[in-house]
């Protein structure tokens, strides 16, 4: 009979490894926030991070937001038309965007652009000894490199999500009013009646949580690129960046489910 | 005998392993204040690891490091912070921030470790650039500078905090002979000008002997020799002789090949 012990041992090793990695990530994030308090001239780097995550990612948010609204308008109209409720198109588009699609899609777009850039930049800085150089100068590398990015994410993700919602609603109105003949006033009044404060609060909660989780995961992978298993140099940077983007995307969807189940 | 207070840095019985591989196996050395101290040794001897252990980048497994008479240890953060304020590290790769200009690179340690006003930081950074003859390139990024200028920029960043001890990790790695001479001349010149203590790790023997006050030979994770350059040149120790006379050994090996005699590998 084959002994189950090796299988149990392998499972145990994986479980311990996962627990250690989660603990390491939690300590990394906590140290980044703690060191923010002791970092000099944080404001300048915070504004630079706002620019990187905000202004540089604006085009992708506008484009994806507009197309999401256009598609929601089209699909929503054909579904509602079956029940003779085209007047509720504005409500459908608004609630879909605010409660679910805007925070998730905006976060995924920001992971693709700002998150991957962050992981790659930190990975290269690790590779070229820039992070070690900071430590030898007595500069806290978490405070200097990571903290401003995490603080900026807490501000930028909700703002980008709000912009995504605004552009998406406009896209929905183009589909509904201009292309399919729903009255413009009917569309916008349905939007106004549908959205409640609780929906907006949930939207911002989600956006801020996604921002913190995704940027910290990307920073963690880039910062620790030298610890990437089975890869060194440029390969370690590319592997770390890929893992950061994939894991961040999964984290967004998993956290979305958890937050929704608590807030609904 | 030199009094203990004349040593800025003391390393005693330092050990470091990476996995099962021992790299440092009991390194002991004393670096006199205000001197250029070079650690020589073949590639893979553990020179850079020794430097990183001393600078606090790597954590040694065992041993004792004292700076200015105070032991450095993770449980003594005040001494550790004081040490970091008073020393600088010049990396083999220069480790310059390529997204920052030359001026911003030099200003970085002052911005992040002092409460000096912006105006003073700028003045001191420009002064460091001027001393290294780089003030005309203050607005350039490191990628727009030549290899030698990048090395000088890294040195400007290292000295802008007015350190007492500067670590040089293979400062001439990958440079041609002319640039190698220029870098060693730069180390000697600025060490005299600013008065810092320099701990240099290199395998360029002739150049190191010319600029150093003391040299040590690191071999198989231990210090095999430590003394003045003249003592190193005159030493009959076979380990020193083998490393010091490696160009002559190459010449002997090439003599037979040039004469058309291909040596039999199996013969000793």
Image: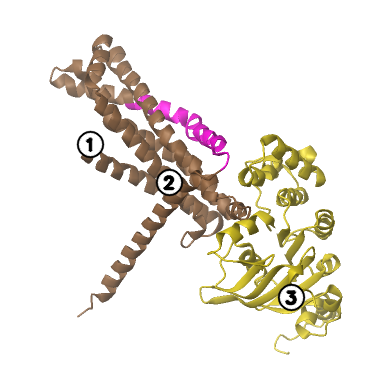
Chain colours: A brown, B yellow
Q: Is residue A32 above or below residue A152?
A: below
* Mark number displayed over residue A263: 1
Tell me the distance, in whole angstroms, between the alpha carbons under discs 2 and 3. 45 Å
The part of the chain drawn in magenta is A40-68
Majority SS type along the magenta span:
helix
Q: Which residue is drawn at 54% across and 39% down?
A: A42
* Mark number displayed over residue B99: none
Q: Residue at x 57, y 55 (%)?
A: A127
- Report the residue marked by disc 3: B217
Q: Is residue A96 visible?
A: no
Q: Position of residue B97 (x, y in %)?
A: 63, 46
Tell me the distance, in whole angstroms, between the alpha carbons under discs 3 and 1. 67 Å
Report helix, strand or loop for mark 1: helix
Q: Give the left or right position of residue A4, taking residue A138 as reference.
A: left
Q: Mark 2 lies on which chain?
A: A
From the viewer's side, name the closer residue of A12 and B67. B67
Q: Position of residue A1 (x, y in %)?
A: 19, 80
């Amino acid at each position: 009979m084959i002994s189950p012990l090796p299988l149990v041992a392998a499972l145990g090793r994986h479980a311990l490894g996962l627990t250690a990695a989660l603990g390491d990530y939690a300590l990394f994030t906590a140290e980044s926030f703690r060191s923010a308090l002791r970092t000099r001239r944080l404001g300048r780097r915070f504004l630079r991070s706002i620019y990187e995550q905000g202004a540089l990612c604006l085009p992708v948010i506008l484009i994806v937001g507009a197309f999401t609204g256009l598609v929601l308008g089209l699909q929503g109209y054909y579904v509602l038309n079956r029940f003779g409720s085209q007047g509720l198109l504005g409500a459908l588009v608004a609630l879909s965007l605010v409660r679910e699609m805007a925070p998730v899609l905006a976060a995924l777009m920001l992971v693709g652009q700002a998150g991957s850039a962050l992981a790659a930049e930190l990975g290269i800085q690790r590779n070229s000894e820039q992070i070690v150089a900071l430590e030898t100068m007595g500069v806290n590398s978490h405070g200097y490199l990571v903290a401003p990015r995490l603080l900026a994410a807490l501000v930028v993700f909700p703002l980008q999500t709000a912009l995504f919602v605004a552009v998406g609603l406009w896209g929905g109105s183009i589909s509904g009013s201009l292309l399919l003949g729903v009255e413009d006033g009917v569309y916008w009044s349905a939007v106004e009646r549908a959205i409640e404060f609780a929906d907006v609060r949930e939207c911002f909660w989600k956006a801020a949580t996604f921002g913190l989780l995704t940027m910290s995961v990307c920073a963690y992978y880039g910062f620790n690129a030298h610890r990437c298993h089975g890869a060194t140099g440029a390969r370690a940077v590319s592997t770390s960046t890929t893992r950061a983007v994939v894991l961040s995307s999964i984290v967004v969807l998993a956290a979305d489910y958890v937050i929704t189940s608590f807030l609904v | 005998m030199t009094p203990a207070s004349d040593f800025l840095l003391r390393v005693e019985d330092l050990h470091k392993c990476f996995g099962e591989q021992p790299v440092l196996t009991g390194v002991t050395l004393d670096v006199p204040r205000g001197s250029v101290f070079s650690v020589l040794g073949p590639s893979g001897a553990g020179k850079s690891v020794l430097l990183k252990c001393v600078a606090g980048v790597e954590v040694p497994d065992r041993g004792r490091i004292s700076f200015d008479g105070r032991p450095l240890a993770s449980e003594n953060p005040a001494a550790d912070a004081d040490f970091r304020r008073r020393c600088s590290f010049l990396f083999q790769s220069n480790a310059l921030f390529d997204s920052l200009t030359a001026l911003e690179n030099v200003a970085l340690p002052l911005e992040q470790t002092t409460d000096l006003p912006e105006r003073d930081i700028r003045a001191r950074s420009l002064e460091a650039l001027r001393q290294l003859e780089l003030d005309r390139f203050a607005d350039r990024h490191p990628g727009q500078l030549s290899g030698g200028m990048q090395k000088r920029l890294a040195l400007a960043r290292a000295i802008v905090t007015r350190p007492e001890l500067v670590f040089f990790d293979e400062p001439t790695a990958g440079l041609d002979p002319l640039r190698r001479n220029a870098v060693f001349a730069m180390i000697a010149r600025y060490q005299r000008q600013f008065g810092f203590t320099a701990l240099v790790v290199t395998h360029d023997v002739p150049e190191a002997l010319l600029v150093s006050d003391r040299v040590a030979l690191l071999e198989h994770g231990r210090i095999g020799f430590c003394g003045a350059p003249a003592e190193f040149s005159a030493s009959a120790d076979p380990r020193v002789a083998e490393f010091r006379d490696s160009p002559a050994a190459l010449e002997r090996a090439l003599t037979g090949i040039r004469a058309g005699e291909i040596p039999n590998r199996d013969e000793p």
